[in-house]
Amino acid sequence: MADSFDQFSVFFTSDAAYVAGKEFPLGQFTTDVLNLDDAVLSGINDQIDKFMSAAASIFTEKTVSAVHAAQEKLNAVWDLVFELPLYRELEIDLDKAYHLFSRLFSDQEKWEEALDVDSEGHAMLEDFLNGLEYLPQSLRNFRGQITGMLELYFERLTRRSAGAYAAAYAQYFTDVDAAGRVLFDAPPFAQSFPVEVQFVPMMGREENARPVLAEKLVFSYLTHFLYTEFYRGLIAGNAPRQCQNCGRYFLLTRGYNTCYCNGIAPGETERTCRKVGAHRKEARGRSDRSPAQVEYDRVYNRLKQRKNRGKISVDEWNVAVARAVEVLEQAGRGELTDDEMRRRFAEF
């Protein structure tokens, strides 16, 4: 069965999501949504507003021209929505989506049911319209919640692992729940979403691969999928992180810990943020060194070269380095002037 805007299937294993047979690391779609330009959501908002106005005319005018006008506006919405993360990977029945109202109008029985406010068909149509109208705001809410969680609870982590993420989320969960109760008299905080679950065998992609047991989840809303994928990613040790160079989010997988992404850095043509960040970190480290540390580095490198060339033995190297460290520590305690420090280091 083909996917649609409000009903689509995704397969999950312990460390990946499969969409239309293609494998994605858990958390990748969340990362892509966090990187969406606000203008994309604003553009979808504008097109949905135009469509909703045209859709209202269907029920008042009940004419072919009104239906065609509404379908035209809806198609402009689809042009943007189906380019969003996940939707662009699904096997959407595009023919059905781009002729939804035209075909509904041409089926007299279904059309009459859609106009009957007490019918199941009308209720389904209302759910569709409400879900579509709320889509941009639901994505903004998702982005706001996840970016806040990552910034306030995850960025300070010294370790990046499933256990560390679980501890951070536990603190977030506790704080949000307590704040809701105290400030808003809200019900207990929860992250739960309606979904249909099936357990199915799935063949691995490698040659001669054995079948694996996967969960086939059927979703009715994009953000329900995104929350599910995000939390499953945390369980697997994956989490989005904001690059400290370009500001875009990237996915840290299986506990790998870095604060720079591997994309091309702003203002660069070849160097990545990771390379630029490493050079900047090294430069900051050099600029923060005291005069004694600078002199010590020179002595250390000079002694290392002598050892590597066989001019001094390993024992002589160890004794000399120990003496140099002693001079460095004396300078750090203020027991040597700069001139005395340089003279002592020059003796090596």
Image (tube, helix red, strand yellow):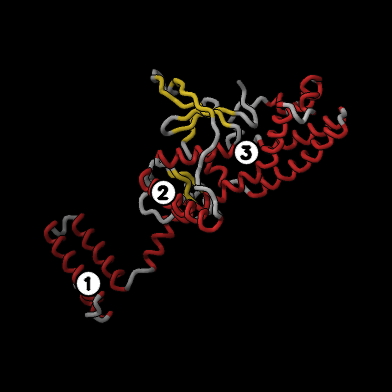
> Residue 292: image x %, image y %?
28, 72
Q: Earlier in the sequence, mark 2 or mark 1?
A: 2
Q: Is residue 100 visible?
A: yes
Q: Amino acid at mark 1?
A: Glu
* Distance CA(mark 2)–CA(mark 3): 30 Å
Q: Earlier in the sequence, mark 2 or mark 3?
A: 3
Which mark's residue is nearer the viewer, 2 or 1? 2
253 shown above or below 336: above
Neighbour class for label 1 at 10 Å: few (<14), some, many (≥20)? some
Q: Amino acid at mark 2?
A: Ala
Tag of residue 170: 2
118 shown above or below 321: above
283 shown above or below 168: below
> Residue 283: image x %, image y %?
41, 63
Q: Amino acid at mark 3?
A: Leu
Q: Which residue carries the number 1 mark?
A: 329
Which mark's residue is nearer the viewer, 3 or 1? 3
Q: Earlier in the sequence, mark 3 or mark 1?
A: 3
Secondary structure beneath disc 3? loop
Q: Is residue 268 visible?
A: no
* Distance CA(mark 3)–CA(mark 1): 58 Å
Q: Which residue carries the number 3 mark?
A: 84
On the rendered image, what quadrant is the N terminus found in? top right
Point out the residue furthest to the left here. 315
